[in-house]
Structure formats: structure tokens, C-alpha cells
Amino acid sequence: MYIRENLRWRVIWKYAWPSLLFFTIYDTAICYLYGPLGFRSLDIPWQPVGTLGVAVAFYVGFKNNGSYDRFWEGRKMWGGIVNYSRTWAIEALEFVTSVVDAPDVQAPPASGQELTERHRRLVYRHIAWVNAVRLNLRRQPELWDEAVAPFLEPAESEQMRQTSNPPTHILRAQAAEMRVLRESRGLLNDFQHVTMMRVIEELFNLQGGCERIKNTPFPRQYAYFSAVFVWLFALLLPLGLIGEFEHMGPSHFWLTVPFSVLVSWVYYTIEWVGHHSEDPFENEMNDVPMTAICRNIEIDLRQLLGETNMPPKIEPVNDILY
């Protein structure tokens, strides 16, 4: 996610120069054919070109609204993951404290060290889930040893790695441990167990929402024809402008080049922005900064455990937060 208030010119130029170069060459060629070479038949009425430009503007705007909705929904999903991560850690620390006073529970009270290790396992497994969701969305299984494995037991990590959807199985392991804590150890009463299971349910909902955005491409009929219409308008634009500028004076048709390049680039850029907002989980410049969010969650949860040796927060690289 680009975090600077204003885009740097080098960033704009990086993405703008190919289109600007093409439009400049194309529009100059049209003017050269029209003027020095005398191909006056290239001049077409401005009215249909202007009408097309209005229609394309509405169409591209509609597509960009849909693209932004996908990005914003993805960001809200990760905002929910942050909130429920804190909720999970607090409940794991405050609910799992001592043996429930129930006559049918025969297990002896757990020691303070056992409780501390159990807290750590529940919280660390959740940190592993958060990072596993990120890797699953970005299709980066090669980062498992770096981002997920340190928060799981070695055997559990290897088992989860082999599954097709590791985040789902990590939450399944959390649910299984909740059942053990309630039935065998007596460390959760029914109300606490149900409350924590509801948090797991919400985490499943958030994971599923992210997977829905990732696995459902933006409707191709909108995305494809948006690009086609923009290019069609850009190619017709100098043909409609060249006659209009010639009415101003003998050599004024050359003004078609700068004005046509500018208008074409604006339309192209609007379409480009919408195209690159369709999938917010691709680890690109304008996507949801999942790596930074995961690190913030890790820091919050480990500090709740009382740890002090924290990894640093993710810093922007060239004004981009990943």
C-alpha cells in the first residue's frame, strides 16, 4: 500500500512512460499523415468521438467503483482479523486460568507453568494462522518456514504444511484444543468454550471472505471491454481533434499531439488504476499491506503474553508498505 500523501514523480513516470511514448508516436504519425503527406481523409467529425469519450468515462468509472469496493472489502476483512486476533488472545489468557469447579471433572489443577505454556501455544498458533492466511492469499508457500513454522510445534507445522488449506486446519487445531480444555482438563466452562468457538467462527468468516475475493476474479466482461473501449477512444481521439485544431490556423493541427496525448493518458491511467485494484492480495504497490498487519498482530499478541523481545515493525520500502 502506497502510504505517501502525494505520488512521487518517479513513481508516476515509471508507469506512465510506456503509454505516453505510444500515444506520442501514434498522434505524431497521424498529424504527419494529415499535414505534410496530405491524407485529409483522416479527419472525422468530433461529435461521435466526443460521445464515445463520455460513454467510456461512465463505463470506466463504473468498473473502477467495483474495483475499489473489492480493495476496501479486503481491507475491512483484515481490520476484522486484527480485532478478533486481540479478542482471541485476551480470551485465551483470561478464560484459561484454573480448573472449573465441577463435580464431574477429575483432572488435577494444572500448574502455573503448564498454564503459561498453554497460553503461549494458543496465542502462537493464532499468529501462525494469521501468517498462513497471508501466504495462502499471496500464493507464497515457500515462505512457510519463515512466517508460520516458528509459531507451531515442528510436527504440527509439518502436518499443516501438507494440507491444501493450512489456515483452515490451524483453526481446526484450535477448536480441538478448546474441546480438550473443556472436556478433559476442565479449564473452560461451557460459556467460555462457546464464546471462544464464536471467535473461531468469526475468524473462519473473515478467512472465507478474503478467499472469496481472491478466488473470484473481477468479471472479465467489465474488465476486458473497459480496456478495449479506452484504447478505441484513444485511437480515434486524434482523428476527431485534428480538424478542429486546423480551423484555428494553417499549422495548428500539430496541437493535436499534446492535447490528444494528455487526454488519452488520463483515460488510460484511470483504467489502469481500476485494473490494479481488482485483486487487493497480490503484494503490489496499491494492495492491502498484509505483511505489516501480520507483524503488528504478532507484536500485540506477544506483548500480551508478557514477552519483551519483539521483532521490529515493517517499515515502508520506497513509500510502499507491504
Image (spheres, rainbow, N blue to C red):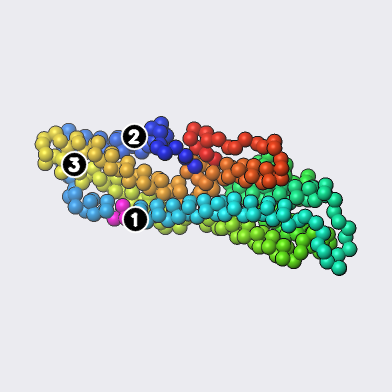
Residue farthest along the bottom direction in this orientation: 104
- At numbered mark 2, what does the secondary structure look like: helix, strand or loop? helix
Q: Which residue is mark 2?
A: 21
Provide the residue span drawn in magenta: 55-59
According to the picture, the residue beneath numbered tag 1 turns out to be 59
> What whole-number distance in Å separates the C-alpha atoms at marks 3 and 2?
19 Å
CA separation in Å, label 1 and label 3: 25 Å
Drawn side of residue 26 relative to residue 106, left or right: left
Disc 2 residue type? Leu
Hey, what amino acid is under mark 3?
Ile
- The residue that label 3 is drawn on is 242
The x and y percentages for residue 210 are 56, 55
Task: Inspect the magenta stretch and tell me whether residue 57 lies in it.
Answer: yes
- Report the mark closest to the observer, 1 or 3: 1
Task: Tell me where residue 8 sits by quadrant.
Answer: top left
Instruction: Tell me the element at label 3.
Output: helix
Dividing the picture into quarters, in which one does residue 173 lie?
bottom right
Q: Residue at x 41, y 31 (%)?
A: 10
The quarter of the picture where the C terminus appears is top right
Q: Counting residues from the N terminus, which is met first, the one under dot 1 or under dot 2?
A: 2
Give yes or no for contact between labels 1 and 3 (Cβ–Cβ under 8 Å): no
- Which mark's residue is nearer the viewer, 1 or 2? 1
Dot 3: within a 10 Å radius of its alpha carbon, few (fewer than 14), some, or many (20 or more) residues? many
Query: Camera-side residue: 112 or 150?
Result: 112
Report whether 255 appears left or right of 117.
left
The residue at the far top in this view is 10
Residue at x-position 33% and y-position 49%: 230
Is 313 above or below relative to 163? above
CB under 8 Å between callouts 3 and 2?
no
Of the residues under marks 1 and 3, which one precedes in the sequence?
A: 1
Residue drawn at x 63%, y 57% is 203
Q: Is residue 80 above or below residue 143?
A: below
